[in-house]
Image (tube, rainbow, N blue to C red):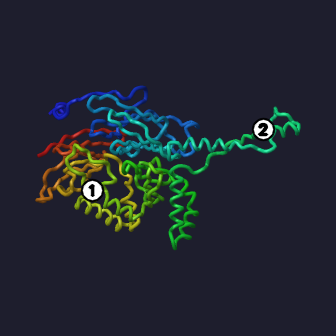
Amino acid sequence: MDPSVLWSHFFKLHFKSQLCRGANVSLNKDLCLFGKGSRFVIVASTSDPVEPSETDRGDDSVQSIRSLEDITIFVVDMQTGATCSEQLFPRDCIMLVYNAGVFLRGDLLAVFSSYYQKIHIFALRDNGELHPLQTIGSTCYPDDQLYLSQTRAECVQPVAGAVDIAAPTSLAQILQRETPAVEVIEEPEDNCIKGVKHRLLSFLWRRAWSSGARRMSDVRYFHHHFEEFRSLRIWKMQLLDDTHLLLKYGSEKYVESRSSDSMGVLVFFVVYNFITTEIVNVYENNSSELLSVYEQCTEFFFEDRNELIPFSLPLPSNSFYTRDSFRKQVYTARNARNGGQDQSIRRNLSDLPVGPQNIRESPYFDLDLFSYDEKLISPSERLKHCFEFPVKFYARHHGRVSFRIYTGKRKGHNTKAHKKLASFLFHPYLPFVLTIQHVIQQQPSSHSSHINIHTFS
């Protein structure tokens, strides 16, 4: 059957929306979030990188990020195709791959600027408008900047004996002046610790000071590593609920990296209440307590379930087989070469914070219903290597193969000169799957893709 005929048999064009206007502006292929019961879709456009100017660099900006873009986030009505809202982030760096820099939970949208180290929180209203609520970073409260400006103004200090050039020089006239002359002190470079970073360092100090018998050693450790703590930057973030953020702090050189591997560097996971501006707790990336919390309360790390999907997402906290698979991963990492308890915990916490809507919601991924080779396919958005043999799904109740999915060409196809990757799009509840195969050729460099449609009963 002709591919275009096959495609039109399953899909019908609903609307077209022109979002990218102007030269060198393109729609980003990574960001796609659905909100308000799938009524709205959130996408983004990017322009060509621009060279940052000195006015773009703030006190908290990450100087190692050189490639900046003009990023615009759109909210599109899925019923009419109309653009409901636009938010421009000029000369910025927002990680859009796997939705790492944008998180949607309910009516709240959080956008993390990696370059400026700021988290912008918006409210998604019923009409699709994005209403700015708060910006978190160098400030914690909305009026912090006003307070800092007033504090800087107090640096203008009266100096006894200062004489204005235009003022009289006689001693009698100077003594009769009601207002003393003022010497304007040039404002020093702002190197103070502000905002969430100040909250973090204060929390670490208080925890070291109140550690009981280990107080002296913990305080010495804090002072010894103070500059390292001070240089920490936010890598990723996610909304845990309507009041709490999970922030991942690490070294500046890894801020722009797309890799989630953080086993060899100092990393802190910070639970921050952005309403009260209090830090609830801080965990290191080898914390067995945080791993236990993640295993027992996994659903709190994922966004609210879509009301249109009639089942819950299988997670280690609510599924026996998913929990068993998670514990096998922990055991395998602990007993691997160069492994151990700490390395096992770091490896299994490396994906935190989790990206929004990155888990495929489908009953065929429910390990209580089906079993499959997780090296070949998984509920996450990550690309998987293509193999000549199919992905087999076994039913739990009888143990036999229920169906197979072929990700590409059958046997006999020459793949030595190509690298083939595949991603899977499952319908939330119907027996319908799209597999997108990506063929990457090294010499000459090229990238092509094609879509396979699978239906089964």
Which SS class for mark 1?
loop
Density class for disc 2 (Cα within 10 Å; few <14, some 14-19, many ≥20) is few
The answer to whether residue 276 is left or right of residue 157 is left
Q: Which residue is drawn at 20% across and 31% down?
A: 12
The amino acid sitting under disc 2 is Glu
Q: Is residue 412 among what the camera can see?
A: no
Looking at the image, residue 271 sits to the left or right of residue 312; the answer is right
For the N terminus, which image quadrant? top left
Q: Which residue is at the front of the view, 219 or 373?
A: 219
Q: Is mark 2 on a helix, strand or loop?
A: loop
Residue 367 appears in the rendering = yes
Residue 219: x percent and y percent? 56, 66
In the rendered view, tell whether residue 336 sits above or below residue 229: below
Indicate the amino acid at tag 1: Leu
Which residue is at the front of the view, 400 or 330?
Answer: 330
Q: Where residue 287 sits: x, y (%)?
A: 41, 63
Q: Nearer the viewer, mark 2 or mark 1?
A: 2
Residue at horizontal 27%, vertical 45%?
423
Camera-side residue of 409 and 26: 26
**Residue position for label 1:** 315
Q: Where is residue 22 in the image (x, y as percent from the top left)?
A: 42, 26
Say which mark, if any, is on residue 175: none
Q: Name the residue under label 2.
A: 178
